Amino acid sequence: MNKKKIFGFVLIIGFSSLLLLNFGSQVGGYMNFEQAESAGASAHVVGMWVEPETFRYNAADNIFSFRMKDDAGNVRTVHYANPKPANFEDAEQVVIEGKPGTDGVFVADNIIVKCPSKYNDQRSLQQAQS
Amino acid sequence: MTTRAHRSSAVADWLHGARAVLMKELRLEWRSRHAINLLLMFVLSSLLLVVFALGSDPAEPPLQAALLWIVIVFSAAVGLGRSFLAEEEQGTMLLLQVNVPGSQVLAGKLAFNVLLIASVIGVSVLAFMGLLGMQVHHGGLLVATLGLGTLGLAGATTLLGALIAKASARGPLLPVLLFPMLSPLFLSAVRATRAALGEGATWAGSASELTALVGFAGAVNTAAFLLFEYVWTD
């Protein structure tokens, strides 16, 4: 009887860790471009734009596009159906929310720009402005 | 040699008892067809509402997956709480307690609930394909998801059904206890179903959802067998 109980508890711990580990990775959390492409669903990707020359706003179609490198080092072209967000050049980090589109383009519905704080860190602000 | 023979006969005894409980449930169900009629009516009427509400728009796979699992989970909550309630109402609980050990009762009831949920899922998937134009791109993934979901749902509803059979306000108690408990199962199952309905579905792409479903089904069923003795003999 006791052996059975111990066996049962071990099983429960094993199964629930299996559940928690895999469930935790599904809800919330950020993905990189490759994970977002394999999931095919809406995703948050953290990264940073590369090469400011590639910023392009097409006023006729209302599409802002740029190249972005995620945390894992994948670089993709991102399309955003809005004008360039404010403070985009000063960003230290951008989070885009959207879906992988056709031919390697990532279509963002939303862009969140993280800028250096004016209040805490004088040095990083100066660096960003210089 | 003798111990092995002894052990295998104990296993055979256990299976025999569980099978007897399952046969009793099936026979009772066959005579009244109470649960299966209730479940099928629930599935069909909620599905008709969905079809009317959507009109002629073909629904997208994410919406279809969510609707399918909402129908399945709600019909499970409506129909499956009855398995132990009926014993309590008919006063046959004591008879069962005297004659069959708890784990065999649980195994029999669990097997019966698995069959009920499997039939509900079969009917609703066919109806979704017929009425909503649901297209399946990866049949194996869908079947695996539905199978694992059935095991998890049956484990959770059977244990909770046994728990609430003794409570006084039982009507709304099962859904209230069940839904929060089912949220990991529901989310993983919806995501895996959505993947199976969409194009380009792979086993590898839904591996984490399927593993989560295996974990849920295993944890819930193990917990049911561990805890059932206390619920049953109390």
Image: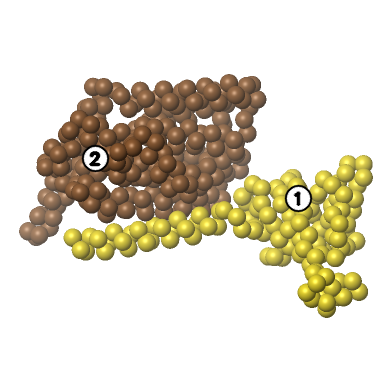
| Residue B153: percent from left, percent from top | 39, 42
| Residue at 80 percent of width and 69 percent of height | A116
Q: Which chain is yellow?
A: A
Residue A24 in picture, x, y percent from top left: 53, 57
Q: Which residue is mark 1?
A: A110
Q: Amino acid at mark 1?
A: Asn
Q: How many marks?
A: 2
* Residue beneath disc 2: B108
Chain brown in the figure, letter: B
**Given the current orientation, which residue lies at the most extreme bottom position?**
A123
Q: In the picture provided, is B159 more to the left or to the right than A76?
A: left
User: Which residue appears farthest toward the front when viewing the image?
Assistant: B168
Q: Position of residue B157 (x, y in %)?
A: 35, 41
Q: Along the horizontal axis of the image, is A77 left or right of B113?
A: right
Q: Residues within 10 Å of mark 2 (few under 14, many from 20)?
A: many
* Snapshot quadrant of residue B199: top right
- Mark 1 and mark 2 in contact? Answer it, CB < 8 Å: no
User: What secondary structure is marked by label 2?
Assistant: helix
- Which chain letter goes with mark 2? B
Q: Which residue does the image show at 92% across and 41% down from the upper left?
A: A60
Say which residue appears at 61% left-offset and 50% top-offset.
A39
**Quarter location, residue A47:** bottom right
Mark in the foreground, 1 or 2: 1
Question: Which residue is more in the foreground, B92 or B142?
Answer: B92
Chain on which label 1 sits: A
